[in-house]
Amino acid sequence: MRLSLPINTLINLPKPRFLIPFSSRSLSLAFPTPSVHRVPVVSPRLCCCHWFSTKAMTNVGEQSIPSVELKEKIELNEKERKIFDRLLSTLRYCNLDTQLRVAGGWVRDKLLGKESDDIDIAIDNMSGSDFLDKFKEYLSSRDEQVQGDTVIERNPDQSKHLETAKLRIYDQWIDFVNLRSEEYTENSRIPTMKFGTAKEDAYRRDLTINSLFYNINSGSVEDLTERGIDDLKSGKIVTPLPAKATFLDDPLRVLRAIRFGARFGFTLDEELKEAASSEEIDLMISGNGPVSAVTYLSELKLFRVVFALPSSAEPSPSENCGSLSQAYLEAMWRLLQTPGIGNFSGEQTRLALYAAMFLPFRKTIYKDNKGKSIPVVNHIFKFSMKRKTSDAETVMNIHQTAERFRPLICPLETKNDVGLDKLDWAADTLEHWKSLPHNDAVVPATSKIRVLTGFLLRDIKDFWHVALLTSLLLSATVDDQEIGQLDFQLEKMRETYLTVEATIHELGLDNIWDVKPLVNGREIMQIAELKGGSLIRVWQQKLLTWQLANPNGTSEECKDWMREIKAKRQRTE
């Protein structure tokens, strides 16, 4: 399996103006507002459409919220009227006590005076596929056939939580689903769907302006959250339920809220901004759709706003860094889902995805106020995301270990140490290894590989699997210079990962970081006749090299080798 992803894709969308840098405390957006603003007075009788002028802006707190020109009732065009008449005829023919409601964006757009062909119909007492059967029955009575139909099964793994029936009527595709409510268990963010009431369905939606229904049976607009119309009038982006709970259920809703704010020039609700800025990024990465989340950020040109970089960053990140980060993230996500690759904990998965996403910045630094060089990744975690310091340290350690892993991968695959004589990061370790008795039959032929890999794993500990996968991502090549695509040969990466993992297991390096030294510090001082100082650390590294090269060696054998080395040095001196 090969995954080729563009790294230079730039989507030309209108840019919102961010007044305050994205932080865990606040996010302020300013969008262009129309020069004329009107709202209607909605009459209880939805019989005609009127326009009423009001002030251009309505002040709420410190913000100016644009008023919106809104229609009092929905006016159907000819095609929509014919479609709805045919659906109502189905109810009458089949003697169905069923309410049909158009949901979401179509209702919003029609009230704004915009045409929409995105018709989603919610049914109160049957599934979409059941209604599809009834519709076919009605057409059969008239010696007619459907223009086209299909049923899309639910697939929670792909964030498709409900069966959807699609039907083509008068050259218009329409989606049919049942009204539903959602329940989340304590240990899963994948919702359990069940039939719900129209009110429950309205409250489970992302925003109040998207929670409106048009009841086809009665020809009326239903505002069951009792604020969808008002928020649409005043140009506010608000969640039906408390914003924090809404975003916890589906973190992608944060990006949808920003997208709708940018699209309509609406103002984000203060509670929504507070919940979004403190919760969403980590929830997106930890959730079931991290790739979709980062894709949204990239396409909306919000990547460099959310993950704000210091202006003094060097080398300066490229304009397409968001697309490049997205490509690495998607490759890591697919590898983690690949059969055979071990069960990563939630924490390992989360930090693996961060490590992949921030790979383009692994060598980027900036100067702080004191002129000290600081990794940009540290800045992103600390200032842009307001995450704990340990997250930044782990991700940076993964990056460093991934770079060190690269020259070891081929020797671990082939169990051949050719090419391992010069490693900048292991110069001292290689010198210690050369002092070992290599003609000793008890020293394995793979001792150099075992020593170098052992030191590496002791540094990264149980995140070495993540570092290995990250290292494999760095082997991706540019597939097409003109298009600028990274070529991730995922099947080959998977095979390499499994081979290297098996070799590490065969070398007995599982949990090598938990193995205690054969000789402790007090014994080193006694044998080497030291009173302290940096030489103790040097001897510790030498003895650990001996211990890694001699996996079956004993404490006394290690001490004997130390005495022998000391004696040789004394004779030389």
Image: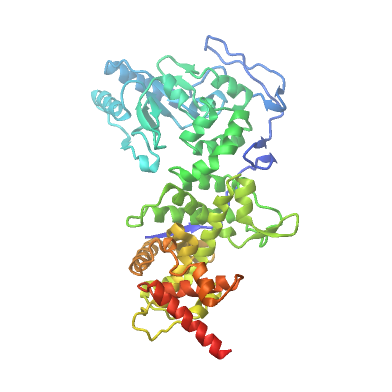
Seen from the viewer's position, the closer of residues 312 and 2 is 312
Relative horizontal placement of residue 400, taking residue 129 as reference (left or right): right
Seen from the viewer's position, the closer of residues 479 and 78 is 479
Residue 407 image point, x, y percent: 47, 73
User: In the rendered view of the protein, which quadrant contains the N terminus?
Assistant: bottom left
User: In the rendered view of the protein, which quadrant contains the C terminus?
Assistant: bottom right
**In the displayed structure, would residue 434 be above or below residue 211?**
below
**Residue ID at (54%, 39%):** 280
Residue 430 image point, x, y percent: 50, 78
- Residue furthest to the bottom: 572
Seen from the viewer's position, the closer of residues 547 and 483 is 547
- What colour scheme does the image use? rainbow
Relative horizontal placement of residue 187, taking residue 399 as reference (left or right): left
Seen from the viewer's position, the closer of residues 498 and 98 is 498
**In the displayed structure, would residue 122 be above or below residue 153?**
above
**In the displayed structure, would residue 475 be above or below residue 375?**
below
